Image (cartoon, rainbow, N blue to C red):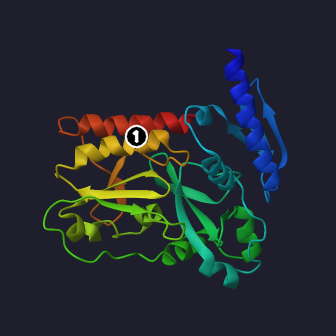
Amino acid sequence: MGLLRRITRARLARRVVRRLRRGGARDARWSPRTLTIRFTAPGDTEPTVLQVRPLLTRRINRRQLDVFVAGLLRTPGLPADWRAAAPLLRPVLRGGAPGAPLRRPALPFLSEFVVVDHPETMTYVTPDQLAAWNVPADRVFAAARANLSGAVLHGVASGPVVVRFVDDGDAYWTSHLLLEGWLARLEGQVGGVPVAFAPERGTLLVTADGSEHLAGLFVQAEKIFMESTRALSPMAYVSDDNGCTVPYPAPPGHPLHHLADRATRLLAARSKK
């Protein structure tokens, strides 16, 4: 490895460590041998190990780095009782999260987590917190989903279009894929059976199945997924007969099979890192 590359890695690692410490993380330290940063987030009892290599493959500015580190930290001070906590809960779709938060399987390689929505950040709910609130996990997940707006789009598309939802921090657009029936209700707004992409946490792309836009969205979603520090999934999703979000069906012989299969393999590979 060249000297310049070692210096670049060390410089980036020091920036991440400084931000983690300012955010309240304990024992944040950099290991150049394993290219990892080990730290304990506020409220956690177990350390988190962060792989630095993925950050080096992208050019990220200071603001993007701050956003990335903020996503690794949880703020202390969860509401002490269930009555205060319930209205603040939101569901989030993630591949993983720092610490050992409450989670349940949602889609291939993705899980559903629950967070407490604060004005400036969000706190992941842990299984231990359920004991403090004296509520079962199913009730926590149900309350979080019920708090989503289930936003409705107005107007009807005259033909297949692409609708892009960009999260302003409060909308939780990608989390809407967890709501039964929500995606299917967009049929009139996209001009056909809705197909959705959630390439990063703050971006949701929806178009109609069979539209001229669909193949291009596979390519666009992959690009966003590969370049984002908040990557989620390059896969496409639809609603099944029960209104539940499922992967877009494209078996061998389907005209988009190679794109759907590539997206699945990309997410699987990223999930193993």
Q: Residue 56 versus residue 235: which sits nearer the camera? A: 56
Residue 178 in sight here: yes
- Decide if residue 203 is on the left or right side of residue 77: left
- Decide if residue 171 is on the left or right side of residue 126: left
The picture quadrant where one finds residue 124 is bottom right
Mark 1 neighbour density, 10 Å: few (under 14) some (14–19) many (20 or more): few
Q: Residue 3 versus residue 174: which sits nearer the camera? A: 3
Q: How many marks?
A: 1
Q: Amino acid at mark 1?
A: Lys
User: Residue, x 67% and y 34% (percent of image)?
Assistant: 52
**Residue that protrudes farthest toward the left in the picture:** 158
User: Residue, x 43% and y 35% (percent of image)?
Assistant: 266
User: Residue, x 50% and y 46% (percent of image)?
Assistant: 231
Q: Considering the numbered disc 1 on the image, is that residue within a helix, a strand or a loop?
A: helix
Q: Residue 147 versus residue 122: which sits nearer the camera? A: 122
- The answer to whether residue 84 is above or below residue 144 is below
**Residue that protrudes farthest toward the top in the picture:** 1
- Decide if residue 45 is on the left or right side of residue 139: right
- Decide if residue 29 is on the left or right side of residue 70: right
> Where residue 255 sits in the image (x, y, percent)?
17, 39
- The answer to whether residue 224 is above or below residue 41 is above
The picture quadrant where one finds residue 225 is top left
> Where residue 210 sits in the image (x, y, percent)?
16, 51
The residue indicated by pointer 1 is 223
Q: In which quadrant will I find the N terminus?
A: top right
> Where residue 170 sits in the image (x, y, percent)?
53, 71
